[in-house]
Image (cartoon, grey):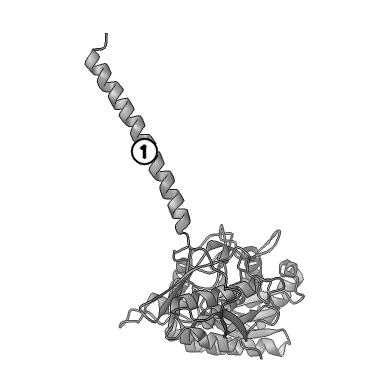
């Protein structure tokens, strides 16, 4: 025969466990809903807002070179927003049908952080690198296009680091080294060797 | 020393359904070894089979062997012909005394690498095979203490399947072997 006080204690403990489990489940559900709402969404340039033209360096696979071209970005944004807009619009060009240097539609620029204050850290998603054509020159064209387009339009960016999903990665797609921080001046020299001949 | 890039689980570029970069580079490396030996040069391969090696392992094994020239072979479906690369060294990393920074170990040999790159490119141009001389941020070139170049082979026809054919590999190998053998005087002097 189980003593009455022991049975009551077990019953109270069981109901407490059940109650706490329900409470924990409720908190986790609420947290998940909140974090989904906090994921930054890409905002398209307002159709009626003012825009400005900026010069970017576009990669061309057909001729294995880089050529300056103009794209439009929303004007009046701060330095960081400007950096993100330039790279997202550049990526948009590469995601069009018949793009000169195709990148997958799932590729995204997650964030651009301006730190230290001359260093830009570009965080791309994993689809960006998974969809990148593997090859020394193909990867080099992507790297130079991104770094040069950013540095040419955001003042005082002299060093650039690339991250994938917020983490360091050894190479872009098996070849070009992503482990270090790139000096814009050195990337500029690479761009010169790949300008149209 | 010839380094067929990639290997094992790291297959490199997918050049076709049954055509992986790691297999093309290994097949080409074996042909190039034969062609260089027949021209009187001693040759070693960094990998003889389908082995996974890190960039650091490749650099360590090359630095320990102290070859006169390190040639890393890559293959791609993009573009046409051959591209000869030398290292773009990162700005960080300063050598102190006898100890060379791992990230910029190539610094002392870079002038020799560039000179050999130019000589090899010029020799290939004479055969009318399309070739370009470029610089790239590519490991393990940064970490090597001897003259080093990377060679990226692309198909001449625009069809990636050509990279796996014996005829094309033989032609590329012969062109490259002639160009490398032509630098023999410089290689012997640097040794």
On the image, the x and y values in percent for residue B31 come to 67, 71
Foreground residue among B185 and A24 = A24
Residue drawn where x is 77% and y is 75% of the image: B157
Query: In the rendered image, is residue A139 in sight?
Result: no
On the image, the x and y values in percent for residue A47 come to 61, 74
Query: In the rendered image, is residue A74 in sight?
Result: yes
Residue drawn where x is 57% and y is 68% of the image: B5
Residue drawn where x is 57% and y is 70% of the image: A44
Foreground residue among A41 and B46 = A41
Residue with the most extreme top position: A1
Q: Mark 1 points at which residue?
A: A23
Residue with the most extreme front position: A48
Toward which corner of the image does residue A65 lie, by quadrant?
A: bottom right
Foreground residue among A31 and B189 = A31
Quarter that holds the N terminus of chain A: top left
How many dots with numbers? 1
Chain of the residue that carries numbered disc 1 in the rendered image = A
Quarter that holds the C terminus of chain A: bottom right
On the image, the x and y values in percent for residue A130 come to 58, 63
Neighbor class of circle 1 (other Cα within 10 Å; few <14, some 14-19, many 20+) is few
């Amino acid at each position: 025969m189980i003593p009455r006080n022991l049975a009551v204690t077990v019953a109270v403990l069981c109901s407490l466990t059940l109650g706490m489990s329900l409470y924990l489940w409720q908190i986790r559900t609420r947290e998940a809903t909140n974090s989904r709402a906090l994921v930054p969404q890409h905002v398209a340039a307002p159709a009626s807002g003012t825009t400005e033209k900026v010069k970017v360096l576009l990669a061309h696979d057909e001729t294995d070179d880089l050529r300056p071209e103009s794209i439009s970005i929303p004007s009046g944004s701060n330095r960081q927003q400007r950096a993100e807009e330039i790279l997202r619009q550049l990526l948009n060009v590469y995601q069009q049908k018949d793009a000169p240097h195709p990148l997958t539609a799932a590729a995204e620029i997650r964030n651009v952080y301006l730190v230290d204050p001359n260093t830009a850290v570009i965080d791309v998603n994993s689809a960006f690198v998974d969809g990148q054509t593997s090859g020394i020159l193909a990867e080099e064209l992507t790297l130079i296009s991104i770094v040069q387009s950013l540095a040419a339009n955001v003042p005082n960016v002299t060093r650039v680091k690339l991250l994938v999903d917020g983490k360091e990665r050894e190479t872009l797609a098996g070849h070009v080294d992503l482990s270090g921080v790139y000096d814009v001046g050195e990337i500029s020299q690479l761009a010169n060797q790949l300008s149209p001949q | 020393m010839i380094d067929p890039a990639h290997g094992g689980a790291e297959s490199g570029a997918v050049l076709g359904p049954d055509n992986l970069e790691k297999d093309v580079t290994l097949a080409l490396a074996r042909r190039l070894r034969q062609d260089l030996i027949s021209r009187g040069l001693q040759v070693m391969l960094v990998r003889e089979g389908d082995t996974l090696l890190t960039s650091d392992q490749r650099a360590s094994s090359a630095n320990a062997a102290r070859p006169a020239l390190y040639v890393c072979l890559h293959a791609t479906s993009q573009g046409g012909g051959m591209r000869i690369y030398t290292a773009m060294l990162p700005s960080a990393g300063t050598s102190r005394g006898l100890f060379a920074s791992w990230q910029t170990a190539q610094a002392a040999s870079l002038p020799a690498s560039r000179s050999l790159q130019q000589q090899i490119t010029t020799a290939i141009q004479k055969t009318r095979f399309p070739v370009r001389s470029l610089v790239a941020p590519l490991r393990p070139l940064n970490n090597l203490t001897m003259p080093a170049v990377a060679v990226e082979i692309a198909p001449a026809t625009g069809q990636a399947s050509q990279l796996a054919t014996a005829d094309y590999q033989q032609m590329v190998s012969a062109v490259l072997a002639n160009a490398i053998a032509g630098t023999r005087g410089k290689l012997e002097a640097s040794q």
